[in-house]
Image: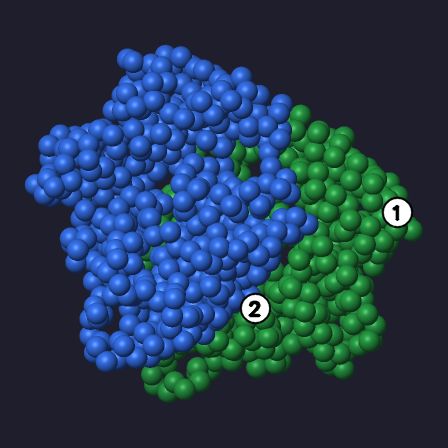
Chain colours: A blue, B green
Amino acid sequence: MRVPPNVSAAAYAQALAEFAQAIGGEWVFTSDADLDLYRDAFSPFLNEPEERIASGALAPLSTEQVQQIVRIANKYRIPLYPISTGRNLGYGGSAPAYSGSVVLDLKRMNRILEVAPDEMLARAQTGVTTQALNNAAAAHGLFYPPDPGSQTVSTIGGNVATCAGGLRGLKYGVTRNYVLGLTVALATGEIIRTGGRLWKDVAGYDLTRLITGSEGTLGVITEVTVALLPDPSTSRTGLAYFDTLAQAGRAVAGILAAGVIPATLEFLDRKCMDAVEQYAHLGLHSDAGALLLFGDDGDEVAVARSFERIAAACADSGAITVQTAGDATESEALLTARRCTLPALSRLGSLTILEDASVPRPRLAEMVARIDAIAAQHQVTMATFGHAGDGNLHPTCVLESAEDTEGIARAERAFADVFGTAIELGGTITGEHGVGAAKLPYLGQRLGTEQMALLRRIKTAFDPAGILNPGKLGS
Amino acid sequence: MRVPPNVSAAAYAQALAEFAQAIGGEWVFTSDADLDLYRDAFSPFLNEPEERIASGALAPLSTEQVQQIVRIANKYRIPLYPISTGRNLGYGGSAPAYSGSVVLDLKRMNRILEVAPDEMLARAQTGVTTQALNNAAAAHGLFYPPDPGSQTVSTIGGNVATCAGGLRGLKYGVTRNYVLGLTVALATGEIIRTGGRLWKDVAGYDLTRLITGSEGTLGVITEVTVALLPDPSTSRTGLAYFDTLAQAGRAVAGILAAGVIPATLEFLDRKCMDAVEQYAHLGLHSDAGALLLFGDDGDEVAVARSFERIAAACADSGAITVQTAGDATESEALLTARRCTLPALSRLGSLTILEDASVPRPRLAEMVARIDAIAAQHQVTMATFGHAGDGNLHPTCVLESAEDTEGIARAERAFADVFGTAIELGGTITGEHGVGAAKLPYLGQRLGTEQMALLRRIKTAFDPAGILNPGKLGS
């Protein structure tokens, strides 16, 4: 039996017995075979996966069961790692547990509790996938605006824990803009209900937004109430090719200056385009230096007018060609280029390290140029794509072999420079994937000593024994 | 010389000398005449204004001066009450200091530091009025979406401190949706910079949103960076009369069900209409039971289409008449009815007590009926208006005499019932004005004991000596 650090074997055996009593023995896992299933979300920049096997996993079904688990864990000082699907994006290391800890697996908590069309909201258990939530909303002519990309895998609880961003951030905002209320089991064993069903509620500190993005370190989110919006009647997509990313950047500036806030505004650099073309054979332009994908939704006439302005701004910035989709099928085809970028890059090697940083929108092209220079300096291959509308970009490093420890070390040094450059340009070390364990060493550089100390004091106010996700935010 | 509680006269004299050294003696006020100017924001439900005179007032000019003040105050344990214009709305008692405390007057910090049109943001010192910020944005074809009503008086720092809502909440959201970054002097004397210039930034806990709405109890906000949006090309207003508020509520449901999210959706009950008509002679319908004011902005054709749907939804719900403005002048005339509601009610007596609560949107008419019954039961006059789109309403009590202590006591009991009813209907005790000192006794009823205890632990993490706004949130 594996035992959590600083806990005696006898105490752990006692805790396991109490966990079994609380949630049923069949939902307490301790065999190597079972625990092996909880290893899949790892970062190449953390220690070896073998060292990060949990000593147990618990799969509760309700808020009350989570509360009982937390109380027992608090009593025996057992570190808990809440996950839903556990597949954090980008190797940030938000999900993985360290050796000996206990995984709190929330994926059985996957019931949609309510869709209230007259209040334009939905309430769901933490483990409901973003896609399932959207399907339930669609049945009422509504939708959940944040689109974190990995809709089918990501869960609403995970979205909230990381304040997930995604493809529609510029026009619609990110997860925090839609979270109305949370049910949270505190590390000290209380259940609190923050916020509720209202857009406007300023009674007390905004714990709803504080817990959103706190990466499971301040409490275990068990239920989420989110705002929905009416499904837009029309949605269209288009793309433009440019010789350089700098031109694409000028087109973005021109689009916004024309008063258009597009629902989608994504870019791929030349390396991403090559990878996508090799993977999906979409007939992308073979000489262009950058691709800009744009989309808008809403009233049909308004969207048509937006598209005229977008096309004009692209042409004014020297676009090689501008294409717009005629219908939904063509729109989906254009979006494929963006949606398959990561799988396409993954095919280029056996280890793909996706990263995440943001810079002020006007500095996007400069940032990508700096990334290219950093990659060259550290002799690694990096391709960059991302959200041109909000300056959030994903430099992605591809290594031929996952065993190439030398290459991994070079990649790590390169990313350290990338994060430093993002901060230098007025940006941040993570726009939407989170800090996790892997980026915690860079957080102080972004926030400063005083704010780091304050983060720790807040963590202590929520979790005095430090049992929730130790080694991550607030540690 | 008045002296703060639990501070010796000698220590206070020493503190005043240090304050004078930090910001210049001419900006340290201690005379009764000067301090009298800081008494204007009070609540009839708090103790007598004479008991709430400060022992000093300090008017710094910069973040650095605020930092020095906080350090000195922390050393001598002197309670600080940060204000900008100090005119909190609705007698919530967010602004006033208690007897002997020191007012930190931030209204000299009124410089707009930057408008960056290419990043669609503005950066301003805390004491800039919402109107001045909007004027600066307008020069670049941009606007700051939250409209807290009292634009000319309210400041951006005050907006952030209360997470101000206002008339455009349904479509555009509230203050927290637009705050990108804050410069904050902590009670412990450090300056922190939360967030920055980005929509997407998840590096660390979301202190930006935690401090937004914390009513000056977690730190002194000295600078604010807010997101702006392109000015909508068209803006139109209309109104509809109904026999009953229940019909107006059904119209609101119908408008949203038709997929329209209007920029404005306000209601007045019959009592408010009477007051407005008597005050402004606008020719409002004399028999209707409720008035619904609606507005939308954006693309001209899209707005026209929204208006068709809104008019249809109103007609379907039994509207007596529906009027739409032909141009901007007519739109402003229609908006006058809403904008002058509070001054109109104020004319009816010599004490007007404006309150603030929210309920889920479908329960608005039920809530107003309950308010009417509560007013009758407690023998007070209450009229209700507010934001029909987000369920945020303003029951307003009018008393003939400000000396009517019996009437004030009846009003206080009536409002206690109103808040209890809002909670019972799934709502909250304050949608946008804040908790302040006056509503703190009701907060536990809304949040529960566990969350109240957590609020206090958070307050302590920020302000261990309790020098910022004691007697308010976190106390």
Where residue A374 appears, as percent x and y from the top left, is: 16, 34
Query: Which image quadrant is residue A345 in?
Result: top left
Name the amino acid, label 2: Val
Query: Are the residues flagged by discs 1 and 2 from a single subunit?
Result: yes
What chain does mark 2 sit on? Answer: B
First in sequence: mark 1 or mark 2? Answer: 1
Q: Secondary structure at mark 2?
A: loop
Q: Is residue A157 left or right of residue A225?
A: left
Query: Which image quadrant is residue B463 in?
Result: bottom left
What chain does mark 1 sit on? Answer: B
Label 2 crowd bin: few (<14), some (14–19), many (20+), radius 10 Å: many
Where residue A334 appears, as percent x and y from the top left, is: 43, 22
Can the viewer see residue A227 in this picture?
yes
Residue at 41% from the left image edge and 38% from the top image edge: A149
Q: Residue furthest left?
A: A406
What residue sits right under mark 2 in the picture?
B435
Name the amino acid, label 1: His
Query: Which image quadrant is residue A292 in?
Result: top left
Q: Is residue A48 left or right of residue B37?
A: left
Residue at 57% from the left image edge and 21% from the top image edge: A304
What residue sits right under mark 1 in the picture?
B285
Where residue A273 appears, as percent x and y from the top left, is: 30, 22
Q: Is residue A336 left or right of residue A398?
A: right
Where residue A346 appears, as percent x and y from the top left, is: 26, 33
Q: Secondary structure at mark 1?
A: loop
Q: CA distance from mark 1 to mark 2?
A: 36 Å
